[in-house]
Image (cartoon, rainbow, N blue to C red):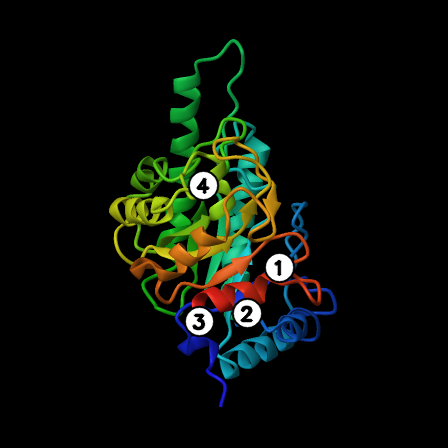
């Protein structure tokens, strides 16, 4: 009898398109690909429109993933930037995160991934002051949303995803997680989504033997046990420290397969889902899902 996704050490899957709907589109695609977990957008990833759900479809989806012990995550739109100095962008970002957290609860998703954002450093401005102002915005925007989640285990997590370091990032790579979490009072519903391409682009030595272990050790040191809730498993088209967010198939980039084997073996990743965002990862015949499973279950 096949092992259920919930019983595996690290459920493996990819980001899928909703298309025909949560059940007929997203879940059907995930099952065809052999996913044990998956990630979706609950609206236009490149727009501000807040797409309302359909209660009957939401209920059917919740029941279906519960029956299959399938762990699901929502990714917030790419436009979200809590550090933006533009009032309209900031306000829409807060509203978008709140909406995505509500939709995640409605469909039974485990967490909402949010990019940690950036600030604008005008040529005639004070970079330090701009950073401080942006971090105050992060605190003022996210803390009320986190508090509203309550302490129920069924509430979705807000999953902070450090960026690759491009532009004026508020949280690029691992070290910046410390001040970011501190701005949120180390809230117990603020989790971490580790994107391997992002932290590698920001300088993490995932391409060195032991480098991935040291990186995860540092994440645990900063955030504490249990805060790492999701891994975006992506290789990188660019070299370490390039500050470029360009994903590559596993083993075809500069990170290499060994880093993912090391990551899967780390004690702190036990029970943590691995979701692919690599080129073609939701195409039939793509090897990345099978490769992760093989690395997990050698």
Q: Secondary structure at mark 2?
A: helix
Whole-number angstrom distance, CA of label 1 to CA of label 4: 26 Å
Residue named by callout 2: 107
Label 4 environment density (alpha carbons within 10 Å; few <14, some 14–19, many ≥20): many
Q: Residue at x 47, y 76 (%)?
A: 5
Q: Is residue 157 visible?
A: yes
Label 3 environment density (alpha carbons within 10 Å; few <14, some 14–19, many ≥20): few
Q: Are marks 3 and 2 in contact (CB under 8 Å)?
A: no
Whole-number angstrom distance, CA of label 3 to CA of label 1: 32 Å
Q: Secondary structure at mark 1?
A: loop
Residue named by callout 3: 297
Residue named by callout 4: 199
Whole-number angstrom distance, CA of label 4 to CA of label 2: 30 Å
The residue furthest top is: 124
Label 2 environment density (alpha carbons within 10 Å; few <14, some 14–19, many ≥20): many
Q: Are marks 1 and 2 in contact (CB under 8 Å)?
A: yes
Q: Of circles 1 and 4, which is in front?
A: 4
Whole-number angstrom distance, CA of label 1 to CA of label 2: 10 Å
Q: Is residue 116 visible?
A: no
Q: In this rendered view, identify the residue nearer to me: 90 or 248.
A: 248
Q: Secondary structure at mark 4?
A: helix
Q: Of circles 4 and 2, which is in front?
A: 4
Q: Residue at x 31, y 45 (%)?
A: 214
Q: Quadrant of the C terminus?
A: bottom left
Q: Position of residue 154 (x, y in %)?
A: 40, 70
Residue named by callout 1: 42
Q: Of circles 3 and 1, which is in front?
A: 3
Q: Position of residue 291 (x, y in %)?
A: 54, 64
Q: Position of residue 167 (x, y in %)?
A: 54, 27
Image quadrant in which you'd find residue 268: bottom left
């Amino acid at each position: 009898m096949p092992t259920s996704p919930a019983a595996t050490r690290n459920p493996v899957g990819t980001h899928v398109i909703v298309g025909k709907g949560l059940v007929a589109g997203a879940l059907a695609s995930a099952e065809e690909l052999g996913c044990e977990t998956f990630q979706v957008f609950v609206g236009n990833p490149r727009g501000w429109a807040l797409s309302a759900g359909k209660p009957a479809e939401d209920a059917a989806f919740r029941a279906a993933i519960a029956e299959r012990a399938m762990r699901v995550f929502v990714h917030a739109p790419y436009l979200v930037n809590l550090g933006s100095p533009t009032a309209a962008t900031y306000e829409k970002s807060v509203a978008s995160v709140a909406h995505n957290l509500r939709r995640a609860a409605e469909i039974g998703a485990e967490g909402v991934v949010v990019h940690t954002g950036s600030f604008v450093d005008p040529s005639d401005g004070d970079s330090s002051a701009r950073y401080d102002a942006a971090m105050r915005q992060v605190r003022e925007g996210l803390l009320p949303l986190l508090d509203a989640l309550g302490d129920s285990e069924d509430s979705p997590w807000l999953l902070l995803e450090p960026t690759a370091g491009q532009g004026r990032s508020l949280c690029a790579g691992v070290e910046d997680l410390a001040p970011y979490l501190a701005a949120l009072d180390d809230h117990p519903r603020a989790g971490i989504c580790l994107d391997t391409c992002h932290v590698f682009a920001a300088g993490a030595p995932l391409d060195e033997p032991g480098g991935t272990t040291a990186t995860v050790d540092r994440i645990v040191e900063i955030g504490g046990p249990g805060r790492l809730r999701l891994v975006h498993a992506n290789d990188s088209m660019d070299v370490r420290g390039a500050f470029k967010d360009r994903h590559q198939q596993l083993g075809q980039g500069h990170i290499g397969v060994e880093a993912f084997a090391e990551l899967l073996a780390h004690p702190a990743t036990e029970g943590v889902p691995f979701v692919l965002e690599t080129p073609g990862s939701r195409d039939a015949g793509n090897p990345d899902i099978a490769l992760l499973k093989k690395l997990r279950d050698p």
